[in-house]
Amino acid sequence: MSRRGRLLLLAGWLLVLAGLGLLVVQRLKVSTDLRSFMPAPTTPDQRLLMEQVGDGPGSRLLLLTIAARCTPHEDHAAQGLSPVTPCAPLPADQRDAMLARLSRGLVAALKHDRRYSQVLDGSFDLAALDSSLLPYRYLLSPTLDTQPLDEAYLADQLQQRLDDLSSPAASLLKGLLPRDPTLEVLKLAERWAPPTPPELRDGVWFSKQHEALLLVQTVASGFDPDAQRQAIGGVQRAFHALPGSAFAQLQFSGPGYFSVVAAAQTRHQADWIGRISSVGFIALLLLAYRSLSSLLLSALPIASAALAGIAALTLVFPQVHGITLAFGFTLLGVVQEYPIRVLSHRRAGEDALHSVRALWPSLLTAIASACIAYLAFYASGVNGLKQLAVFTIVGLLAAGFSTRYLLPRLLPTRVRDVADMRWLALARDLVDRLPRPRWFPVLVALAITVMLILAPGPFWQNDLAALTPLPAPLLQRDARLREALGAPDVRYLLILQASTAQGVLALSEQLQPRVDALLARHAVDALELPSRYLPSAARQLARQRKLPEQATLQRELHTALQGLPFRPGLFQPFLDDVQTARSLPPLTPQRYARTPLGQRLAAMLVRRDGHWLGLATVSGVHDVAALQALGACRTLVGRAANPSVRSIFPPLRRPIEPLWADEASKICPRTAEFSPRPPKPDRLLGAGSGGTVRLLDLKAASESLVAAYRTRILEALLAATVLLVLTITFALRSLRRTWHVLAPMTLATFLVLAVERMAGIEISLFHLVALILAGGLGLHYALFFERDTGDPAEQRRTLHATLVCVLSALLVFGMLGWASIPVLRAIGLTVSLGVAFHFCLSILMAPHAKPDDARQD
Amino acid sequence: MAPLSAVASGPDITPASARSATQVLIASLGQPAPARTAFAEARFMHLLDRPLVVSGELAWLGGNRLQRRVAQPHAETATIADGEVTVQRAGRHARRFSLKRAPQLQVLLDSFVALLSGDASRLDQAFEIQRHGDAAQWTLLLIPRDANVAGSVASIEIDGRGKQSRCMRMQEADGDLAVDLLGPLAARMPAQPTREALLALCRGGS
């Protein structure tokens, strides 16, 4: 090809790549939502997990600490703003006052930020209950359930208020008194405080380690690292903008923070390992081929593979998952082989096109069989695997065909023939003289079987958290803060399900006595039900009916005030509020959602598939069985006999009968709140009114999901194997040759599994993906070693190409094997071992190069 | 345990030319913790048509800890410690709240502890101080420097004779007034106090 023609071709190729790059930049939407990568959930728990992964109230919680630090912020010191000389620690009260001030400042700064649904530092803010909602206190507070607003009660309350006025608390209550003499607002404040609040100093939460504690609930999902990074960044900016923040240190904990740390650490480690291994890779290729232009040109098929793969993804799928890209790039590692093969198989003076033509059948067999095998992943139906298949197949084809049709036309004509190298001839002799006993595969298979049987521990790793690269101190700190704050456990969630939001709230109210019993016997430290924040409409109406008429209340109050020094007419705001409360429509979650506390409720009350779920958070679980028993009970919405409920809530217009599932009546004690009747089959849960309660173990659900996912991958792998055998057999048209290609590959794959299992490694999804890549590389080794050209020089070139491929793969993935991040280590170790085993076994099980030896074998 | 009245027999403070008479006066009021004194308090509040009267004992326990023990008309103990106020009444749950939410108490703490410890600089940090009268019969007027506190407490006046505080009057911003008679004067709280009668008692000669 003419020089001019070559330049044109190169320019054209680069232009196409640039075009693909542009397309990718414009269209690529990377999703970090695990849901789009995982298979469709099958059990209700898995379905809920998929929705609640990161969305549950517990996993959206950030735990913050503000600790004093003696030296000012490094930035200030660096700018020479203040000397770095060690300062004396502040006296305890000044330190606490400073931290409390920062804590309150941070809350004030974040309160109206839409990224956070709740910011708590322990100080109760009366504004949490919107002033327009204040009359609702009589419907929200449990006082009226047991206590009528009569003369005796009022007289007692007023006497207490009088005592309060002479106490130091007077200044607190003075403003509240005319409107709220029974202090319903304070009762609600107590009710809404965290179940086991930490110590209060200067009005905010403090840990035993003298840090101010805060809880921030993000709107963003806990496992969305990007959104969490923004949320955390927002908190940090708000904090550093506070005066005096230089003398304190803000620290985070919680699932959202962990997902950010994990993503950053993985990226950081992958980056520096990638840089080192890239340098090594380039050095290796330069050493092997002594040609910079060849090296640069051989990068083009790899770049084509990656860009074409992603471009195809963006065209076929609206969103690409981050894990697809990570897995996909790993699997595309196989395409680095294509240009290497071409470069190694070139003869001096020969046109590169000519060398490629000789090589192409084997290369095409490798590419085609891999592509056909990956079709099995596309057929798996799992979105993430489909994406993976599209990415990999398009990438392989792009790399393969550009290596065949474009690369050779660009390569410089005059190169040296690697076959002439002395060391290579010696190496080839050595390889040829290696004994290849027939019993060798049997021995290896036996060893694999023994190792797999003897291997310690469980075979599969289902716990995704085990792959979380979080340092232990971080996790310990999280546990400490979680305990101090009584923050909910991320593992368990009590799920209340009913056909309406009101049904969930009613169910929640029915559950309360049993939950109280659990708390009393310390089965759990705390269990927060949605009705804690908002009673059901039925209960609100019941309380409303107990509110006395204005004239009655006025009379009773007048009598109660006899002999007390309260100014006449002082309690008019109280009378007005009660009057208002008597005619209020019940507070609905929708209306409530506009207030800070309503947002808290909104996180606990979600709508899904036409019904409603209440998510009750649990903390400090000591007796899982007792919790599960709570969940096993099938409870029901109380009878909505009250006509006003039915008129307000059309869905409840039909009278609802209490419904009992058979098993529930055995397990669950009948509490006074239920008025059970014999179950009528026609009115069982199908009526759409019944509610269910169950305990969701997010860990168990996620493990079952991982197991299900693995099953899908294994099924796809099995199909891929069958396709591979068929393709190779068809391509080689000989069962014996097929055996020589596939037997070493299969044995090597199982050998990697066996060795890793013997080392105590539990096999995760990442190990499986790495095994697939190693298998792809192994297929190349076996195919090319098996290729019998009868030409010793060509055999030497094959060995050279394979050695360069093996060394480069070992270099890249061996480096990953040293990573401290479990995911990277899993991939690195598995591919390295795989490459080594595939290489050794394909040599030891290949037919001998010399024709007479080959016949013997 | 030194009663407040013991101040009179305490060691003399040598007047130094560099210190103002006010500082000398405040320093002279200082005494070792714990210090206790009887008190009787009348509160005139706009919520009520007659004043609330309680009596008992005020104690400075050292540091920032103050205790107010009411004996009449009902038993109640309020403790201020570590920025938190605890109010304990017989037969009821203790009520706790942050000192930050009760500026009046912050003022009480600042003034009372500063006076009892004779800490003029602390008093000066929290208040603008004016002194009226002479060493035999004096009145300290304290105006909170913190704008937030001043929004709720307008001023505190402390009347005394020699080295003894006799009377503390807290004027709240909303017009409410609390008058505390201290030490021996506590026994002389009238059954039906008026603002005028108490003022006369605090300033009074006898």
Image (cartoon, grey):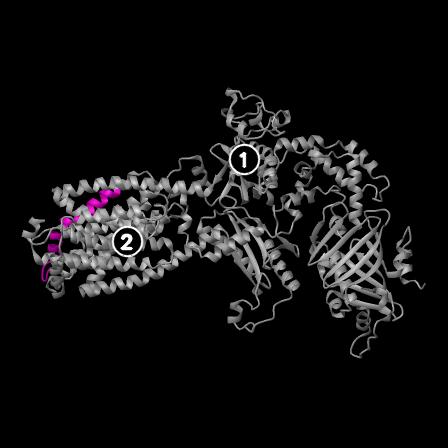
Q: Is residue A301 visible?
A: no
State which mark lies toward you, 2 or 1.
1
User: Callout 2: residue from which chain?
Assistant: A
User: Seen from this angle, which residue lies furthest bottom?
Assistant: B17
Relative placement, left or right, of A192 versus A379 is: right
Q: Nearer the viewer, residue A551 or A40?
A: A40
The residue at 79%/31% (across/down) is: A552
Q: Quadrant of the N terminus of chain B?
A: bottom right
Magenta residue span: A347-374
Instruction: Tell me where residue B101 sits by quadrant.
Output: bottom right
Residue A279 image point, x, y percent: 28, 64
User: Callout 1: residue from which chain?
Assistant: A
Is residue A669 found inside the magenta-colored segment of the image?
Answer: no
Relative placement, left or right, of B108 versus A43 is: right
CB atoms of marks 2 and 1 within 8 Å:
no
Specify few, some or many for label 2: CA neighbours under 10 Å numbering under 14, 14-19, or 20 or more: many
Residue under pointer 2: A831
* Residue B127 higher or lower than A708, as above or below: below
Q: Amino acid at mark 1?
A: Leu
Residue under pointer 1: A630
Q: Nearer the viewer, residue A541 or A582?
A: A541
As helix, strand or loop, the secondary structure at mark 1 comes to helix
Report the magenta stretch's main SS: helix
